[in-house]
Image (spheres, grey):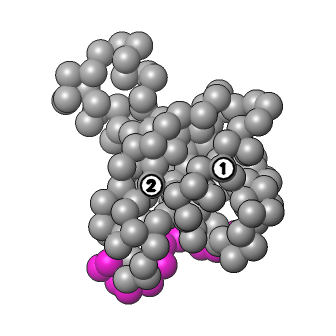
Amino acid sequence: MRQGVRIALDIGDARIGVASSDPHGILATPVCTIPRGRGDLDKIAALAAELEAFELVVGLPRSLSGGEGPAAVKIRETAGQVLDKVREGNSETTLRLVDERFTTVTAERMLRERGKKGSKRRAVVDQAAAVVILQHALDFERETGNPPGRPL
């Protein structure tokens, strides 16, 4: 298992959910939700620098059959912009794209089970989805010894 903090991003049209791991890569925890728009990439870069993240894990939307549609193309483009911005501060940071099928559904169910209702749930669902994405990535690496997903 590679050591170091990882940051996961659940990139949506309106918000970006952010989660991070501990330095040992065991547990994913929610960090924040960043509104999309002016300064969003700067905020991600600042978080990556503050947390000394060596890797970004970005959820890539795929269809049920595993294919990629227009949403995946958009995420790849945004992920490239995020990586460029983060590398201004740390040129060694890497970014991996991981399958995010069902993460929002899983996050919604998890929040519902914990008693989060309506607007309170909507306010944190992006963070929860980022946690699901990152925890799956951490578990995959721990079980297989291989980094998750594919590098950008």
Left or right position of 12 against 147: right
Q: Secondary structure at mark 1?
A: helix
Whole-angstrom CA distance, mark 1 to mark 2, is: 13 Å
> Residue 147's x, y, as percent?
48, 78
Q: Residue at x 31, y 60 (%)?
A: 27
Q: Earlier in the sequence, mark 1 or mark 2?
A: 2
Q: Give the position of the N terminus as an image quadrant.
A: bottom left
Task: Residue at the far front: name it.
Answer: 50
Front in this rendered view, residue 11 or 29: 29
The residue under label 2 is: 20
Residues shaded magenta: 142-152
Nearest to viewer (mark 1 / mark 2): 1
Above or below 26: residue 18: above
> Residue 3's x, y, as percent?
42, 79
Above or below 49: residue 110: above
> Can I make out residue 126 in this image?
yes
Q: Which mark is residue 46?
A: 1
Above or below 1: residue 132: above
